[in-house]
Structure formats: C-alpha cells, structure tokens
Image (cartoon, rainbow, N blue to C red):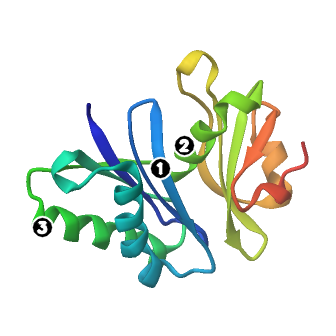
Amino acid sequence: MSLYLAIESATDAGSVAVGEPGRVMCERRFADMRHATALAPAVDDALREAGADYASLAGVVVADGPGSFTGLRIGFATAKGILRVHAELELRTTPSLLAAAWGARAEAGGPVAALYDALRGDVFAAVYDLAGGRVRELLAPTCVAADELERSSPAKPALAVGDGENSLML
C-alpha cells in the first residue's frame, strides 16, 4: 500500500487528505484563511483517523497553485518541514485546479471547470475533460476576468468547482 499525505492550501479553505492512489481514506478541511494555525493539527488528525503515521507514508503531495501566495507558502513550508524530519518521503506536486476538477469527475458528465477567486473580479480557471480517467486540458490554467471566462473556454463545462464557481454561468 502506497499511502500519501495530500496538502491543499491554495484558497481561503484548505484541506489535508490521507490515501492511496484512487482511494481517499480521510480528509480534513479548514476555512477562514486559518492555514498557519490549522494545517499542522489537520495533518495530525488526518493521519490518526486513517490509522497511519509518517512511517507508513510513501510521500507528501502538495498542490502548487495557482492561488493565494501566502496559503501556498504555508502548504509548502509544512511539507518541507515534514520531509526535513522524514527524509525518506518523496515530495510530489499537483496543480490545484486539476486536483479540484479531478475530485468532481464522477459527478460531472462532461468537462469540469475549476475556478478559484483571484480577487477584483478575476478567477484562476482551467477546464478539463476527465472522461475515462484520463486528463485532457481544454483550457490551460489562466487568470481571467470572470465575465471573459465563457468566451475563453473552447467547451461549455458540465460542472464548475472551486471558490470561484459562482463566476461561471453553466
């Protein structure tokens, strides 16, 4: 079994999960931009609930944005701190928007738009076709005005996810 600890800290709401490829065993979420105080306890809680410890992990996966610069720094600093103590673990990264879209693939029934609020009326956005467990990027990650997004996407999404999802009219 290859267990991984996953850290997502790109938006106002963060999360930590423990699982193996294809199966999430435990997830902890926190909100209100409390990353600095909530992330380490969430890691401990998730590992405990999953019945795992650092010795049972193969690695740490960190979402690498786009998103809040401060949130991303806290996520990477936490992962680096873990790897400093547990040097045998590997560090992997994944795009935040792809991770959000992937999590919704079963409910989508078509392309998935992942959107994060970039403030001032803009969104970080990407559109993916995730049919058959494969990833096809229809709109590469970009920062765009919310009202321009529909014109930018080559396909109409069946589902939108993320904290900027209200910016997209499906």
Q: Quadrant of the C terminus?
A: top right
Residue flagged by tag 2: what amino acid is it? Answer: Leu
Q: Nearer the viewer, residue 88 or 134?
A: 88
Specify the amino acid type for callout 3: Arg
Helix, strand or loop at label 3? It is helix
In the rendering, at what x and y percent does residue 21 appear? 39, 32
Identify the amino acid type marked 1.
Cys
In percent of width and height, residue 71 lies at 47, 74
Considering depth in this image, is 19 or 78 the residue closer to the camera? 19
- Asked if residue 63 shows in the view, the reply is no
- Who's the residue at 77% across and 45% down the image? 160
Q: Residues within 10 Å of mark 2 (few under 14, many from 20)?
A: many
Q: Which residue is mark 3?
A: 84
Q: Decide: is 142 above or below 154.
A: below
Callout 1: SS: strand
Q: Which mark is residue 26?
A: 1
Q: Quadrant of residue 19?
A: top left
Q: Earlier in the sequence, mark 3 or mark 2?
A: 3
- Crowding around mark 3 (Cα neighbors within 10 Å: few <14, some 14 to 19, many 20+) is few
Front of the two marks 1 and 3? 1
Number of numbered discs visible in the structure rendering: 3
In the displayed structure image, the side of residue 10 where residue 42 appears, left or right: left
Which residue was labeled with disc 2? 98
Mark closest to the chain's N terminus, 2 or 1: 1
Q: Quadrant of residue 159?
A: top right
Whole-number angstrom distance, CA of label 1 to CA of label 3: 24 Å
- Which residue shows up at 52% across the image and 65% down it? 10
